[in-house]
Image (cartoon, rainbow, N blue to C red):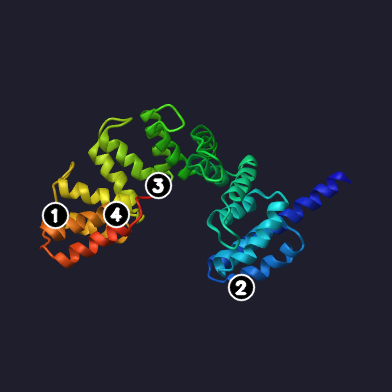
Amino acid sequence: MRAGLALLALVAGLARAASVDEAMSAYRAGNPSGAHALLAPAADAGDPVAQHHLALVLEFGFGRPEEAAQWYRKAADAGYAPAQNSLGALYYDGRGVPRDHAEALRWYRLAAEAGDAQAQYNLALMLGRGQGVTAPDPAASAQWLERAAQAGAPRAQAQLGRLYLEGFGVPRDPARAVQWFRRAADAGDPWGQYWLGFALQKGEGAKRDLDAARRAFERAAAQGHAPALYEVAVIDELGLGVPSNAKKAREGYRRAAQAGERRAMERLARLYRDGGLGVKPNRAESERWAKRAAQAAAPANP
C-alpha cells in the first residue's frame, strides 16, 4: 500500500512538473495568458509550486504585484522556500504590499534556513546593510553569503569575494577573494568579472596581470555592466597594457555614462569643459553631463 501511494505521489509530482514547465515555456514565449491558464487549476487546488509560478506570471507577465502577493503568500505559508523569498522581495521593494524591511527579512530568513540560495544572498545583504535589524551584522552577513556561495550562487560568490578583499565581517584575505571572484566570473556573473579585473589590475590576491584584467573587464562590459565599461575606457585612455586609443576611450566613456556610470559622466563633463580625447570644449554639454553626474546615484554594488 505504501509503495503504491509513493508511486502515485511520484506520478503526480512528475505531472505537476511537466505542467509547470509547459506553463513557463509559454510565458518565456511571450504568452503569459497561456501560462496563467495552465497554472491556475493546480494553484487553485493548493499546489505551492504552481502557486509560486502563477504569482511570477502575475507579477512579471501582467504587472499585477498585488495579486501576485496573494499567491506568493499562499505558497510561502505552505513552506515553499522560493515563494518565501519572492514574498520577501515584494516587502523589500514595496511592490504589491507596503514596504517593510523587517517583514522582508523575516521571509528571507525562513527561505534561507530552508536552503534557498537566493534568499541566503538577500538575507546576507540586508544584514550587512543593517536593514530590518537594529544594526549591521557583518559577521552574520558573511556567514549567509558563504552558504549561498558554497551552494553555487554566482552573485553571492562575487559579494563574498568583496568581503574578503575588504575584510568586512571576515579576516581580510585577498587571495581568497580572488578565488571567489574567479568562480563567479567563470559562471558568467558580471560583478565577479568586474572585481576579478579590479584585483588583477591592482595585483591584489594574485600577480598583477593587465591583460587578464582587461579581459575580465571586457567580459563584464559585454553584458552592459556600467562600472566595467568605465574601466575599459580608462584602460584605453591611459594605455594600461595596451596602446592608448582616444577614440575608443571617448566612445567607452559615453557608453558607460549612458549605462548610468557616474564616473563616466564626470569624465565627459571634464572633457567637454577642457577638451581632450578628440572632444572640443562645449560648455552646454559639460554642464549637461555635470548635472547628470550630480543626479546619479553612487555606483551600485552586488
Q: Circle 1 sits on which residue?
A: 246
Residue of label 4: 262
Residue named by callout 3: 301
Asked if marks 4 and 3 touch (Cβ < 8 Å), the reply is no
Question: Considering the numbered disc 1 on the image, is that residue within a helix, a strand or a loop?
Answer: helix
Mark with earlier residue (4, 3) = 4
Q: Residues within 10 Å of mark 2 (few under 14, many from 20)?
A: some
Which amino acid, by three-letter code, is at mark 4?
Answer: Arg
Q: Is any atom of residue 17 visible in this view?
A: no
Closer to the chain start, of discs 2 and 3, is 2
Marks 1/3: CA–CA distance = 28 Å
Q: Where on the picture, by quarter, is residue 174? A: top left
Instruction: Indicate the secondary structure of the residue bearing disc 4.
Output: helix
Q: Amino acid at mark 2?
A: Ser
Quote the CA–CA distance across marks 1 and 2.
50 Å
Whichever of labels 2 and 4 marks the residue nearer the N terminus, that label is 2
Q: Nearer the viewer, mark 1 or mark 4?
A: 4
Give the residue displayed 26% in from the left and 38% down from the top: 201
The correct choice, above or below, for 118 with respect to 25 in the image is: above
Q: Which mark is residue 202?
A: none
> Local crowd at mark 4 within 10 Å, few (<14), some, or many (≥20)?
many
Above/below status of 298 relative to 291: above
List the residue tagged with mark 2.
33
Q: Earlier in the sequence, mark 1 or mark 4?
A: 1
Could you say whether the residue bearing mark 2 is in a helix, strand or loop?
A: helix
Q: Residues within 10 Å of mark 1 (few under 14, many from 20)?
A: some
- With 1 as the anchor, is 171 left or right in this view? left
Q: Amino acid at mark 1?
A: Ala
Q: Position of residue 226 (x, y in %)?
A: 32, 54
Estimate the spatial distance between the alpha carbons at disc 4 and disc 3, rounded to whole Å.
13 Å
Note whether residue 44 is visible.
yes
Foreground: disc 1 or disc 3: 3
